[in-house]
Amino acid sequence: MRKIIVLLLLVTTALTVSAQKYSPNTKWPYVYENFTEGTIFFDGNKKTKAQLNIHLLGNVLHYLTDDGRIFTSNDKDVIRVEIGPDAYIYSDHKLVRIVAVDKTNLLVELTKADFDALFTSTGAYGASLNSSSSRDLSSLDLGGLENAELGRMLQEKNDGRDIPLKKQYLFILGGKQIEAIKKSVESVLNADGQKEWKDFQKQNKIKWKNEECLSQVLNFISSHM
């Protein structure tokens, strides 16, 4: 009976841990909880596979070498990045997740770390950047990860403070990036689109942080440019 109880406790603990939502922190400031197998696609139909993650300081791509070191990949000639089930492209030198595609136009999501909120003197996340409490943010924490070892980061992975995140949605229209907000949409519509836009808004209660709603807006834009 004792063995069964111990086993049940272990299973329950494992399920509780796995159910906890991942949150990036100052010791592990990444979009993903772990480096994940992915593919980088380049111009000229070239591609390479690697263990990948996205560092939240600048939304840059990091890859893991066989000897456990972490390097930053630049965006030269990169046309697409796939990490697990997610697909990314570079826009304004930042990796953004592809949410929806219509013709050559895209709806994308940019996940940004709110470092300002983390270190505001009056906020709930801690003291000011000038205080001693911020000194634990070494170059390993928030960037400068050239030649950093994964082993060291894993040892400290759970020791950092949670980083608040902000989600921003963007439309990429013919290669041009605009915010997914009402004002920006109205600025790119043609004459017919301007006329139909009011009716579209009445028929569709647009929630500007909802991906399904924004995908409908993308379809409307693509038909009225």
Image (cartoon, grey):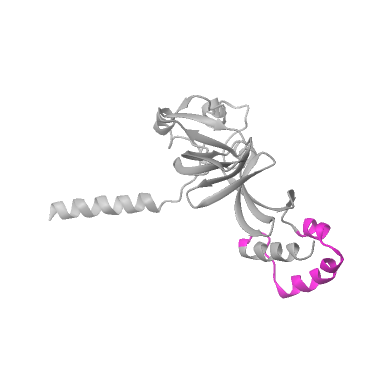
Residue 189 colored in magenta in the image: yes
Q: Nearer the viewer, residue 120 or 95?
A: 95
Identify the image quadrant of residue 107.
Answer: bottom right
Task: Compare residues 98 and 159 and report the one nearer the observer.
Answer: 98
Q: Is residue 144 above or below residue 221?
A: above
183 with respect to 214 (left or right): right
Q: Is residue 81 visible?
A: yes
Measuring from the top left, give residue 72's x and y in whole percent: 55, 31
Instruction: State which quarter of the image contains the N terminus.
Output: bottom left
> Is 74 in front, or is 182?
74
> Is 136 placed above or below 8 here?
above
Q: Residue lying furthest right in this view?
A: 191
The magenta span reads 182-211
In the drawing, does residue 64 fall left or right of residue 223?
Answer: left
- Residue at image location 62% in from the left, 59% down from the top: 100
State the image quarter where residue 173 is shown.
bottom right
Queried whether the magenta region covers residue 130, the answer comes back as no
Location of residue 66 by image quarter = top left
Residue occupying the point 73% across, 52% down: 179
Q: Is residue 33 visible?
A: no
- Residue situated furthest front in the rendering: 44
Magenta stretch: dominant secondary structure: helix
Outermost residue, left direction? 1
Residue 55: percent from left, percent from top: 55, 37
- On the image, the x and y values in percent for residue 168 come to 66, 50
In the figure, 177 relative to 63: above or below? below
Residue at 82% in and 67% down: 193
Quarter of the picture holding the C terminus? bottom right
Q: Nearer the viewer, residue 44 or 85?
A: 44
* Residue 158 x, y percent position in the rendering: 43, 37
